[in-house]
Image (cartoon, helix red, strand yellow):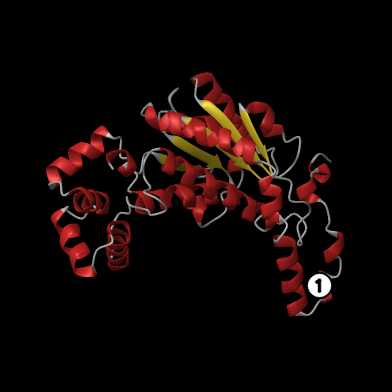
């Protein structure tokens, strides 16, 4: 009965005839519903900011940002964490996604994993959670036992805890220091929280990881100067970033990317200041990675 009271489990009055609608009308309805999501997310910016500040502090203390969830929520956390590595050259340990059921749950349902508070605790123990970490528990319903168990353990460890739910008055909110509740309303397909709820979670995670990385010097102006050029596309992106930041030619950007050892940020500092690679690296380290502080 408790599940039936959740907004995410209610029936959407606009989609009662979903099964007989022409395809184009289904798409129009979904698109219309999706457009409401960013507006609702906007109402939680104050809470999202608190998580960003907590994560920045964790990084400054040598800690980590840990996302933990089950099902779609867990997968979105893993996705956001993984993307921080190529986008910001972040160490894979800095932002981690933990999902109930482990790696197998990324592609297949692991029955019963989300119902175990003890498993949530065990998964955080496995990664040696510390008091310097920030833990964000993600659950569209806001009541997942796995997430609650993880948050309770994180609190006992001394880590900063936050929650992300898509229902108001969510149970997980009571187990977190900072609660984000994005009430997107009933789904077009009743109970399918991979839809608007998943979109809301993705938007919030985008904000948290991006703003946090800006906060620790991973961005110059609006350029991802710490991009990790691990493939041909990213090598070209790195060159373009150098060109845009330093106002140089493609050939010069290519030369300095090579001379910097494939580090776009170092190449930019070299070009803007005339410093050697070694001195540019030293200045960056002294400035905690912030290019503007060197300028």
In this orientation, which residue lies closer to the viewer: 33 or 250? 250
Q: Is residue 186 left or right of residue 252?
A: right
Whole-percent x, y for residue 197 in the image? 67, 52
Q: Quadrant of the N terminus?
A: top right
Q: Residues within 10 Å of mark 1 (few under 14, many from 20)?
A: few
Q: Is residue 205 visible?
A: yes
From the image, tell me which residue sits under label 1: 19
Which quadrant of the structure image shows residue 170?
top right
Residue 90 x, y percent position in the rendering:
35, 44
- Find residue 58 and report its image quarter: top left
Residue at (47% x, 47% y) in the render: 210
In the image, what residue occupies the spot 45% across and 47% down?
81
Q: Nearer the viewer, residue 146 or 173?
A: 173
Where residue 133 appears, x then y in whole percent? 45, 29
Does residue 115 show up? no
The residue closer to the viewer here, 104 or 22, is 22
Secondary structure at badge 1 equals helix
| Residue 130 drawn above or below residue 6 | above
Asked if residue 73 is positioned above or below residue 238 in the image, the reply reads above
Residue 148 in picture, x, y percent from top left: 62, 32
């Amino acid at each position: 009965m408790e599940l039936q009271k959740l907004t995410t489990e209610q029936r959407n009055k606009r989609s009662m005839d979903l099964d007989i609608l022409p395809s184009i009308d289904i798409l129009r309805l979904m698109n219309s519903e999706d457009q409401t999501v960013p507006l609702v997310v906007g109402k939680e910016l104050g809470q999202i900011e608190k998580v960003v500040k907590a994560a920045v502090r964790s990084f400054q203390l040598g800690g980590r940002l840990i996302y933990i969830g089950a099902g779609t929520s867990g997968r979105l956390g893993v996705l956001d964490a993984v993307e921080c590595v190529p986008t910001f050259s972040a160490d894979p340990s800095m932002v981690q996604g933990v999902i109930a059921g482990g790696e197998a749950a990324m592609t297949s349902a692991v029955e019963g994993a989300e119902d175990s508070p003890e498993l949530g605790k065990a998964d955080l123990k496995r990664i040696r959670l510390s008091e310097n970490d920030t833990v964000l528990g993600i659950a569209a319903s806001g009541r997942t036992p796995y997430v609650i168990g993880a948050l309770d353990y994180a609190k006992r460890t001394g880590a900063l805890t936050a929650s992300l739910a898509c229902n108001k008055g969510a149970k997980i909110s009571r187990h977190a220091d900072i609660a984000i509740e994005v009430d997107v309303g009933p789904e077009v397909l009743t109970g399918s929280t991979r839809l608007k709820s998943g979109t809301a979670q993705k938007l919030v995670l985008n904000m948290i990881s991006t703003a946090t990385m800006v906060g620790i010097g991973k961005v110059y102006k609006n350029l991802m100067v710490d991009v990790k050029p691990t493939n041909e596309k990213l090598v070209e992106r790195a060159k373009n970033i150098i060109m845009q930041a330093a106002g140089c030619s493609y050939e010069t950007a290519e030369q300095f990317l090579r001379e910097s050892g494939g580090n776009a940020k170092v190449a930019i500092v070299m070009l803007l200041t005339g410093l050697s690679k070694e001195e540019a690296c030293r200045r960056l380290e002294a400035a905690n990675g912030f290019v503007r502080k060197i300028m």
